[in-house]
Image: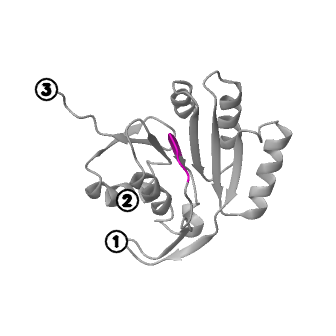
Amino acid sequence: MIVILRDLQSRQRSKVIEFGGGESTLAIAALLKTSASGGTIETIEHDSAFAEELRGRLARAALSDIAAVNTAPLRHYPAQLGFQEFRSYDLAGVDLSFDVAFVDGPIVDQFGAATRLVPLRWCMERMKPGRAIYLDDAARQPERDIVSALKPSAAHLRFDLLQAEKGLLKISMQSTAVG
């Protein structure tokens, strides 16, 4: 979490999108509210009861003005890219801009090895210079397999595995050589 918070501190008026809310939502929102750089966070959560609980926690912490929790139901996805069928967010109609994206859901053990494929691909398809995507738990085999499957179509992106307990992958635009 410290890596992401440091990244946000170096930006101005950041728009953060997070897939899978919780403690990270509160930490990011608190930083954005108290930091001179400011910004907003939009969290995508599949569980409507948990989303409502998180909204309450944000309200009690006086963070609702910069943090929004959206519900995106899960749907079944067919087998693809070598993965068996799985469940993940239904992101049809989700049209949010971001500077920093944090993919920390859905839960692999409950919804299938490729469950984070959908939010990660969604972010990668919207990648622009200056944006960053962070994938939590990137050292786990399901996440490594997802990244390996997406890399061939993402030559314009850079993948940096950062030191973290369960691995944190930062995805950004490749630098273009000048000269």
- Residue pictured at 65% horizontal, 23% vertical: 35
Does dot 1 land on a helix, a strand or a loop? loop
For label 3, the residue is: 179
38 to 152, vertically: above or below: above
**Whether residue 117 is visible:** yes
Q: Is residue 25 left or right of residue 85?
A: right
Q: Pick whichever, 164 or 17, lies toward us.
A: 17
Q: Is residue 157 left or right of residue 164?
A: left
Three-letter amino acid code of the residue under disc 1 = Gly
**Whether residue 168 is visible:** no
Give coordinates of residue 59: x percent, y percent.
83, 43
Point out the stretch of residues depicted in magenta.
96-101
Mark nearest the camera among 2 and 3 is: 3
For label 1, the residue is: 82
Q: Pick whichever, 31 or 65, lies toward us.
A: 65
Q: Quadrant of residue 79?
A: bottom left
Give coordinates of residue 98: x percent, y percent.
52, 44
Does dot 2 land on a helix, a strand or a loop? helix
Q: Few, some or many C-alpha atoms within 10 Å of disc 3 (few <14, some 14-19, many ≥20)?
A: few
Q: Is residue 149 left or right of residue 32?
A: left
* The magenta stretch spans residue 49: no
Report the magenta stretch's main SS: loop
Task: Please say if the residues under marks 1 and 3 sit with CB atoms less than 8 Å apart.
Answer: no
Of mark 2 and mark 3, the one earlier in the sequence is 2
Give coordinates of residue 22: x percent, y percent.
69, 48
* Quadrant of the snapshot with the C terminus: top left
Mark identifier at residue 145: 2
Q: Few, some or many C-alpha atoms within 10 Å of disc 2 (few <14, some 14-19, many ≥20)?
A: some
Q: Pick whichever, 111 or 67, lies toward us.
A: 67
Three-letter amino acid code of the residue under disc 3 = Gly
Q: Quadrant of residue 177?
A: top left
Q: How is the image coloured?
A: one colour
